Amino acid sequence: MSKALSTNWMTGEQDQRISEAFGLERARLRNFIRRRVPDENDVEDILQDAFYELVEAYRMMKPVEQISAWLFRVVRNRITDLFRKKRPEAMPKVPATSTDDGEQLLLEDLLPSPDAGPEEVYARNVLLEELEAALDELPEEQREVFVAHELEGYSFKELAVATGVSVNTLLSRKHYAVIHLRQRLQAIHDEFMKA
């Protein structure tokens, strides 16, 4: 009988800790996810998955010590999983640059065609891997601004409203990101220009 009381007390305590975590961390986690995931349905799915895993951890008698840090780690992993699943989609149709004539070039236009044969597919994959590695090296704030502006097509004004960061700060972050990316990708650029 005392074992049943002890189990009920532990379950009640777990439920209370989960409820407190949900109340304290829900808004922060949602905002964190929204800054990285454009689709609101995906945001909600990731948030629900994180809290589901928290409940499961407690039910499996694996209580979490630092709930906030644990939840953010779960959310980061879910975001990574989401982008890995969506990776085969076509490149965004956002202009990457313009020609001297004012014609808009897409990132897709600047990469070797995936239909042009094995050598071009290899070159394309190498370039995309190098770009991804270079982006991963950036500080988070710089990476977020660069990706949102260059790859997702958000204007600096839209980003300023969404993040609460001034346009000048966003411009500065992107500037430093571009400098790093140019330096980091110069060797691969030179190698492809020789070939």
Image (cartoon, helix red, strand yellow):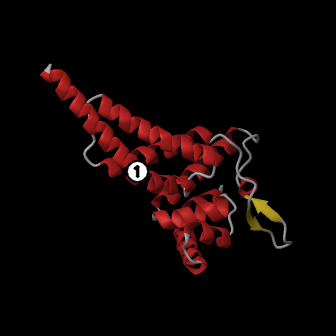
SS of the residue under disc 1: helix
Q: Position of residue 112 (x, y in %)?
A: 71, 50
The reply, left or right, for residue 36 in relation to residue 154 is left
Q: Position of residue 128 (x, y in %)?
A: 60, 50
The reply, left or right, for residue 150 in relation to residue 9 is right
**Residue furthest to the left:** 2
Q: Position of residue 25 (x, y in %)?
A: 40, 52
x 71%, y 45%: residue = 90
**Residue furthest to the bottom:** 168
Q: Position of residue 174 (x, y in %)?
A: 57, 71
x 72%, y 42%: residue = 114
Q: Examine the rendering and report whether any part of residue 14 can be seen.
A: yes
Quadrant of image for the N terminus: top left
Q: Quadrant of residue 62?
A: top left
Residue corresponding to mark 1: 23
Given the image, on which type of amino acid does mark 1 rest? Gly
Q: Which is nearer the eye, 145 or 119?
A: 145
Q: Examine the rendering and report whether any part of residue 186 can be seen.
A: no
